[in-house]
Amino acid sequence: PTHPLMYVEPFVALLIVANGIMIGFQTEPTYQVWDGWPIIECVFAGFLVLEIILRMHLLGCRTFWCGDDYLWNLFDVLLGITGVTDVTVELANQRRSEIPTSLLRFCRLIRLVRIVKVFRLKFMKDLRLMVKGLVAGIPLPWRLLCYSR
């Protein structure tokens, strides 16, 4: 039988890619001033928190916090916290401009890290294996080059 998370993960991957595209549009000067960005960011942060809650419910608290993927789950929780913080800072900055822009840039940079989540999804296993092989194989040619002297 297929685990229910397998049905959720393609939707999560789609949301992650859409979020990355949205961040790209936000950095484009012609689109930066649009007033709808905070609303869209709230929606993405809400989906991220909802995904964490759903994953915790489907896996059970014990498996979520102590299972094989507990580090990925902690990463998700950290992203959820930074996502909610980012939205809160963004909304507070709309009312008063006392928050330094460097903090806002840092929050946006953290949002880009969400794209790493795509590699944890089960249906991306083949891609994950190829990337691991590529990363593991990089030092080998370097060693051969160093020892050939």
Image (cartoon, rainbow, N blue to C red):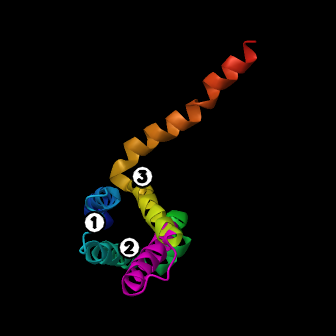
> Magenta stretch containing residue 92, yes or no?
yes
The residues bearing labels 2 and 3 have C-alpha atoms spaced at a distance of 16 Å
Secondary structure beneath disc 1? Answer: helix
Task: Identify whether 94 is placed above or below 108.
Answer: below
Q: Residue 58, located in which quarter of the rendered image?
A: bottom left
In the image, which residues are magenta? 75-101
Give the residue type that dot 3 points to.
Phe
Mark whose residue sits in front, 2 or 3: 3
Residue 49 x/y as whole percent = 37, 77
In the picture, the disc for residue 103 is none
Secondary structure beneath disc 3? Answer: helix
The residues bearing labels 2 and 1 have C-alpha atoms spaced at a distance of 9 Å
Q: Mark 3 points at which residue?
A: 119
In the picture, the disc for residue 8 is 1
> Magenta stretch containing residue 81, yes or no?
yes
Disc 3: CA contacts within 10 A as few (<14), some (14-19) or many (>=20):
some
Q: Mark 2 points at which residue?
A: 55
- The structure residue drawn at horizontal position 56% and vertical position 72%, both measured from the top left corner, is 66
Q: Main secondary structure of the magenta part?
A: helix
Tell which of 72 and 46 is nearer to you: 46
Disc 2: CA contacts within 10 A as few (<14), some (14-19) or many (>=20):
some
* Label 2 vs 3, first from the N-terminus: 2
The residues bearing labels 1 and 3 have C-alpha atoms spaced at a distance of 15 Å
Are dots 1 and 3 in contact, CB under 8 Å?
Answer: no
Are dots 2 and 1 in contact, CB under 8 Å?
Answer: yes
* Label 1 vs 3, first from the N-terminus: 1
Q: Is residue 2 left or right of residue 131?
A: left
- The structure residue drawn at horizontal position 49% and vertical position 83%, both measured from the top left corner, is 98
Give the residue type that dot 1 points to.
Val
Mark whose residue sits in front, 1 or 3: 3
